[in-house]
Image (cartoon, helix red, strand yellow):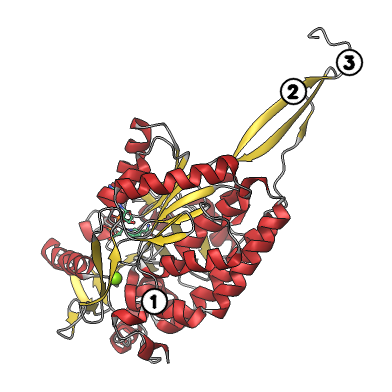
Amino acid sequence: MASDLFNGRLEDVKFTQLFVNGSFVDSLSGKTFQTIDPRTGDVIAAVAEGTKEDVDAAVQAARHAFDSGPWPRFPGSERGRILMKLADLIDQNAEELAALDAIDAGKLYRWSKTEISSVANMLRYYAGAADKIHGEVLKMSREFHAYTLLEPIGVVGHIIPWNFPSTMFFAKVSPSLAAGCTMVVKPAEQTPLSALFYAHLAKLAGIPDGVLNVITGFGPTAGAAISSHMDIDKVSFTGSTQVGREVMQAAAKSNLKQVSLELGGKSPIIIFDDADVDKAVELALIGVLYNKGEICAAGSRVFVQEGIYDEFEKKLVQKAKAWAVGDPFDPNVQQGPQVDKKQFEKILSYIEHGKREGATLLTGGKAVGNRGYYIEPTVFINVEEDMVIAQDEIFGPVMVLMKFKTMEEAIKSANNTKYGLAAGIVTKNIDIANTVSRSIRAGTIWINCYFAFGDDVPFGGYKMSGFGKEHGMEAVHKYLQVKSVVTPIYNSPWL
Ligand code: NAI
Ligand code: MG
């Protein structure tokens, strides 16, 4: 069983070096850092610590692969064939990959396995897209033939967060590979292991050397070297709003590289009186507890209409108290540890802040056990909309529960946030569902469901949740640029 394979022993982790120009290498400084098992706080492995010099070497390899290598020049079908092969290799190694994410990020092993098969399918979606990238013929005027070419943007830098090490890696890597770009990927320092395994599989699949480089290391060094690099054409970032701002500034101050940002959220779930209360409770709990709340689209603000509020609150507490927190390899557990000590302490300090602000702790609020980074499912009531716990992204298993009277009031409260990533609506009334979905300023609206992601469904923020979509063909277009070509047809005054 995979949990025995990965007990935090160094010999179990196969890939711990940087992947540059098709080879695993030590960092140029020779330095390493430790990646930690959040179940215990123990070290899993020492991983190469890449810095600016390593990013430079990786960019050089990616630039060479872009300017003179086969990848951007292959017919799309050939890129597609190789991506299909990579998808099969991922399926063949799914247990090991799932175990790496589970031990590195504290993700439930069984959910991690589902995630790995989803990323294989995401790759297949983009494999199919690789030969369907084309421009259009334009009308312009009778005297000219005008058309557009869609060209890969060049060398891309991807900066990945730790909450979904595999999904976030492939949400960026697959569409940019399909587009014909070459790239440097920096996984989060908390979760470097699966990305290095993917680099190994990419080589086996036949992705040419230099096309996909992986530099493990820290944000202010390796990450900042990407966003400020003079020879990277685009940076795609997912993470905190604060660092998103820094990435954009670095891009502006260096070579004006294009930027796409997928940042935080404080997404509302609005539950109307006509909802099935038991199902709504399930939906709201999953909405905030999935991946222990470490998910950008978490439905962390729950608004319940007054007619069902009391019943909802009662049932929510029962279910939250029964929620099983523990070892992510245990098949009965519903919630593993937070990713690291820093995130664990941040969440607990938000909980303390909520109490000081005058909100009431309905359930939870404490750490679980005395080893590792486990936190109880936590629900606050008596919350004012402008409290810090109702405005900041906590990124943990913490819900704020609020009561509303009218639809108009719910819309106003739901929009009272700087973020706009997602929203949930629970109602059987189609007029309410339609009105609310058009009134919420957020990039994704889930009606009577939550976290319903699809490979072909664009995902990304409004407002301070960022810009630039992931998933769907929209994501391929982020890595393409449009070239217009114009030529006279007859009687040209130009020649
Ligand atoms: P972070 O934004 O610092 O980390 C995300 C990625 O950015 C990592 O790969 C990191 O190494 C890199 N990075 C950090 N500083 C950088 C810099 N100056 N230049 C370039 N890259 C840099 O997020 P952190 O500190 O791990 O988490 C803090 C909060 O951010 C979380 O509590 C959560 O609220 C939010 N977050 C949101 C995510 C999302 O999915 N939207 C994912 C991860 C965190
Ligand atoms: Mg870790």
Q: What element carries label 1?
A: helix
| Precedes in sequence: disc 1 or disc 2 | 1
How far apart, in angstroms, are the residues tagged by discs 1 and 2? Answer: 51 Å
Point 58% across, 53% down: residue: 177
**Residue tagged 2:** 486
In the displayed structure, does residue 34 sit left or right of residue 143? left
- Location of residue 208 by image quarter: bottom right
Comparing labels 1 and 3, the label whose residue is closer to the camera: 1
Residue 268 placement (x, y as % from top left): 39, 61
The numbered mark at residue 490 is: 3
Classify the position of the C terminus by image quarter: top right
Q: Which of 218 and 440 is in front in this view?
A: 218
Q: Distance between the residues labelled 1 and 3?
A: 63 Å
> 462 or 251: nearer the eye?
251
151 versus 462 height, above or below: above
Residue 465 vertical position relative to residue 454 in the rendered view, above or below? above
Picture coordinates of residue 19, whole percent (x, y)? 42, 59
Residue 290 percent across, percent down from the top left: 39, 74
Q: Which mark is residue 100?
A: 1
Residue neighbourhood size for the residue with mark 3, other residues' Cα within 10 Å, grouped as few (<14), some (14–19), many (≥20): few
Count the marks: how many?
3
Q: Callout 1, which amino acid? A: Leu
Q: Does the residue tagged 1 have its C-beta within 8 Å of any atom of ligand 2?
A: no
**Location of residue 364 in the rendering, given as x and y in whole percent from the top left corner:** 22, 79
Q: Is residue 308 shown to the viewer in this render?
A: no
Q: Quadrant of residue 98?
A: bottom left
- Secondary structure, mark 3, is loop
Kind of residue at badge 3:
Tyr
